[in-house]
């Protein structure tokens, strides 16, 4: 690739990064655990399963260009994931939501679609209701939490105009939401523009802690990214993967923030989940500029403070070394061929594109 096209590409992505600032496109954050102790996590394309005995195998083989960032799991052990991809022929970003049983049987809530059903997502409660953030990090004109009931009725639970304000329903304001997780009382916890916030089932929004991305003197920042994936325990403590500062934070219900785990370069935490006995499992991604992506690993933090690696997905397990990004328009993030700016820029493009599709679909229906 010549210098001029590369410069144009990176400049365009830099503009998009500024426009979609807090979106901070991220590597996969999806990591969940079932009642049998099996851990599922995404490396962006392939979803892996780690058995309690330590055996690691591909649970859902990936397809190049089909990205699965987040995962959820229900009481029966069914794993849910959302696909985002790019159609170069139509210049659109089709998405889909799948459900896969522990035995590997897969069905789709909806298949790849340029205009997906509004608010039908992987974020669901036991009653079948699903939740979706309708947000536009580009124009920063809207950020609202939508609820879809099992009969297909969609309402705005909280938010509306872009911003930051606590309150109930339309009084609340959201910025750009990066991570989501349900608490024990079915409240929704989110990382929103560097803050941790809680949305109760009746639409009451409360900010628990701010400035989660603030660097401590001995942190080793990655230089990009921010607070992303999170998990919440039975007492309402939230555990947040702070990708940008290579650490995991614990936030108590009263807003006290503590760094409980660090990652050494080139690793950065992107997602977390909790085991029933109180162990914290952390999904981490390795990137070494300008173009080496080693694949994710999972580390375990035990209640006694012991930290150990329980799974690693390297180039061998992925099947081949990460390839070059053929072009930004194709939206392929199988490697970091043009460096982290392109990788993160593509993620921002994807987030903005999906948001745009959801807004367009909502307006079409209204």
Image: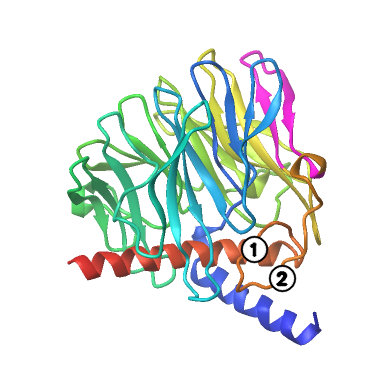
Please tell me the numbered disc located at residue 285. none
Secondary structure category for the residue under label 2:
loop
**Image location (x, y in percent) of residue 279:** 59, 19
Please count the marks in the image: 2
Taking the spot 22% from the left edge, 40% from the top edge, the residue there is 150
Neighbor class of circle 2 (other Cα within 10 Å; few <14, some 14-19, many 20+) is: few
* Residue 302 lies in quadrant: top right
Outermost residue toward the front in this view:
105
Query: Which residue is depicted at the point 20% across and 47% down?
Result: 152
1 and 2 marks in contact (CB < 8 Å): yes
Q: Position of residue 16 (x, y in %)?
A: 55, 73
Find the distance from the CA under tag 1 to the CA under tag 2.
Answer: 7 Å
Please name the residue shown 31% across and 41% down the image.
206
Question: Which quadrant does the C terminus fall into?
Answer: bottom left
In the displayed structure image, the side of residue 315 where residue 183 appears, left or right:
left
- The residue beneath circle 2 is 326
Q: Which of 157 and 98 lies nearest the eye of the viewer?
A: 98
From the viewer's side, name the closer residue of 100 and 206. Answer: 100
User: What residue did someone put label 1 on?
Assistant: 332
The N terminus: image quadrant: bottom right
Residue 54 lies in what quarter of the image? top right
Q: Which residues are magenta?
A: 296-315
| Left or right of 215, for residue 104 | left
For the residue pair 13 and 18, the one nearer the viewer reads as: 13
- Circle 1 crowding by C-alpha within 10 Å: few under 14, some 14–19, many from 20: many
Pinpoint residue 235: horizontal percent, then vertical percent: 40, 20
Q: Is residue 103 above or below residue 240?
A: above
**Residue appearing at x 59%, y 53% in the figure:** 26
Q: How is the image coloured?
A: rainbow
């Amino acid at each position: 690739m010549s210098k001029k096209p590369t410069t144009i590409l990176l400049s365009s992505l830099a503009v998009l990064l500024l426009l979609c600032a807090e979106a901070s496109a991220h590597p996969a954050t999806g990591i969940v655990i079932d009642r049998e102790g099996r851990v599922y996590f995404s490396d962006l394309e392939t979803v892996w399963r780690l058995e309690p005995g330590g055996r690691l195998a591909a649970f859902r083989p990936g397809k190049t260009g089909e990205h699965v960032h987040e995962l959820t799991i229900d009481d029966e052990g069914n794993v849910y994931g959302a696909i985002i991809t790019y159609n170069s022929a139509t210049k659109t970003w089709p998405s889909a939501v799948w459900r896969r049983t522990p035995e590997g049987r897969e069905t789709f809530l909806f298949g790849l679609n340029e205009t997906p059903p509004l608010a039908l997502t992987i974020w669901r409660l036991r009653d079948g209701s699903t939740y979706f953030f309708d947000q536009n990090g580009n124009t920063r004109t809207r950020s609202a939490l939508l609820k879809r009931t099992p009969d297909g009725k969609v309402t705005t639970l909280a938010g509306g105009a872009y911003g930051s304000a606590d309150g109930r329903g339309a009084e609340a304001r959201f910025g750009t939401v990066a991570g989501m997780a349900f608490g024990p009382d079915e409240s929704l916890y989110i990382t929103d523009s560097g803050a941790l916030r809680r949305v109760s089932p009746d639409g009451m929004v409360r900010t628990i802690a701010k400035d989660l991305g603030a660097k401590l003197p001995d942190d080793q920042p990655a230089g990009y990214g921010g607070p992303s994936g999170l998990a919440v325990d039975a007492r309402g403590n939230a555990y947040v993967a702070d990708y940008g500062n290579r650490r995991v934070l614990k936030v108590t219900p009263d807003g006290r923030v503590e760094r409980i785990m660090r990652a050494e370069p080139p690793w950065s935490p992107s997602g977390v989940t909790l085991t029933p006995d109180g162990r914290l499992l952390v999904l981490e991604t390795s990137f070494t500029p300008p173009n080496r992506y080693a694949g994710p690993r999972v580390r375990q933090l035990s209640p006694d403070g012991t930290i150990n690696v329980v799974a690693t997905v390297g180039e061998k397990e992925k099947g081949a070394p990460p390839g070059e990004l053929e072009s930004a328009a194709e939206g392929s993030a199988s490697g970091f061929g043009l460096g982290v700016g392109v990788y993160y820029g593509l993620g921002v493009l994807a987030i903005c594109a999906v948001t745009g599709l959801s807004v367009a679909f909502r307006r079409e229906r209204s």
